[in-house]
Image (cartoon, helix red, strand yellow):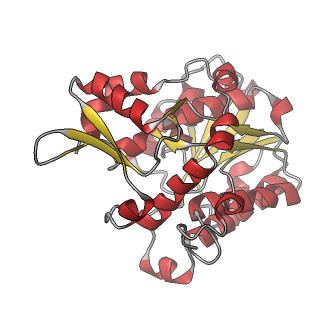
Amino acid sequence: MSETKKTIVVVGATGSQGGGLARAILADPDGPFALRALTRNAGSPAARRLAEDGAEVVAADLDDEASVRAAFEGAYGAFVVTNFWAQRPEADVRRRTAAQMELEQAGNAARAARAAGLRHVIWSTLEDTRPALGGDDRVPVLEGDYTVPHFDAKAEADRLFTAEGVPTTFLRTSFFYEAFLGGMGPVRGEDGTLALTLPMADAPLAGIASDDIGRTALGVFRHPELVGKTVSIAGAHHTGAELAELFTAALGEKVAYRAASFDEYRASGAYAADEVTNMFAYYVKAAATFTGDRDLTAVRALNPGLQSLPEWLSQHAAATVR
């Protein structure tokens, strides 16, 4: 019976990470958890689909602490994620940076979680890149004193949950496979050949499908002993050359790997080129630690259905090509 289940509030339940967790909870009707989907627009088609599938859908906004506090009331736990890349009104863009937005929203969520007495919060976070990248002349400082703001602000926000005494698991994610659908996949040149161009030299890239972040989060909720722990996750580790081989196999035609320099990628005109290039600089400089902390066997223990990149490409390869 649903009333005996522990309610998990999922922030961003119509988005990528939150959506993956929402679907995972709904796909386990005999499991211990019930879904309360938090979304800014409870009338959106995606929110209505969740309601039709059995979710409790609640309208709340991370910028409105009172609404989040009300959404958390009576729940067992919550999955909290912020979206650095969210489209924002121009007035909001002028008022605060995206990093400041993430910190403010994380603070609202942490205070709301404490006030509601939540017993297990998962905060979707990342490493602070500044210790690795600080002082590197190839890496410009962005948004004040950050090197990779969408990493560093989340890492700074970790302390907000700790300071509020919120029982939190810090879930460190990695590069989304879905980025290959958003412009980072193979590009067909004028000569008709395909090339995968990334500024990562021969370093390994830790990647994961966004759905697997949600499925792994569900595994974390099943293990309350992970409160207070940092859990770093990925679905695979591949060098650029290995990625090109996997794309070749999935597409049925040769994909060459082209290792761009940081300066070349920064000047490429790619979306958020400075931020993304700094991110790859971190992946390269901290490769051993970043991939080493993401033990695939440990992740698979939390999420037995963890997708390899070939499995993900079997469904999405064609759509990655530009």
Above or below 89: residue 179: above
Q: Nearer the viewer, residue 119 or 288?
A: 288
Residue plotted at (41% across, 21% down) = 311
Q: Is residue 85 visible?
A: no
Q: Nearer the viewer, residue 16 or 171?
A: 171
Q: Residue lying farthest left?
A: 191
Image quarter of the C terminus: top left
Q: Quadrant of the rendered structure where residue 301 is? A: top right
Above or below 21: residue 187: below
Total numbered labels:
0
Residue 220: image location, x then y, percent: 72, 31
Residue 93: image location, x then y, percent: 49, 77
Q: Quadrant of the rendered structure where residue 149 is? A: bottom right
Residue plotted at (48% across, 43% down) = 16
Residue plotted at (48% across, 45% down) = 14
Residue 27 in the figure: left or right of residue 310: right
Image quarter of the N terminus: top right
Residue plotted at (42% across, 38% down) = 240
Q: Quadrant of the rendered structure where residue 163 is? A: bottom right
Q: Is residue 117 visible?
A: yes
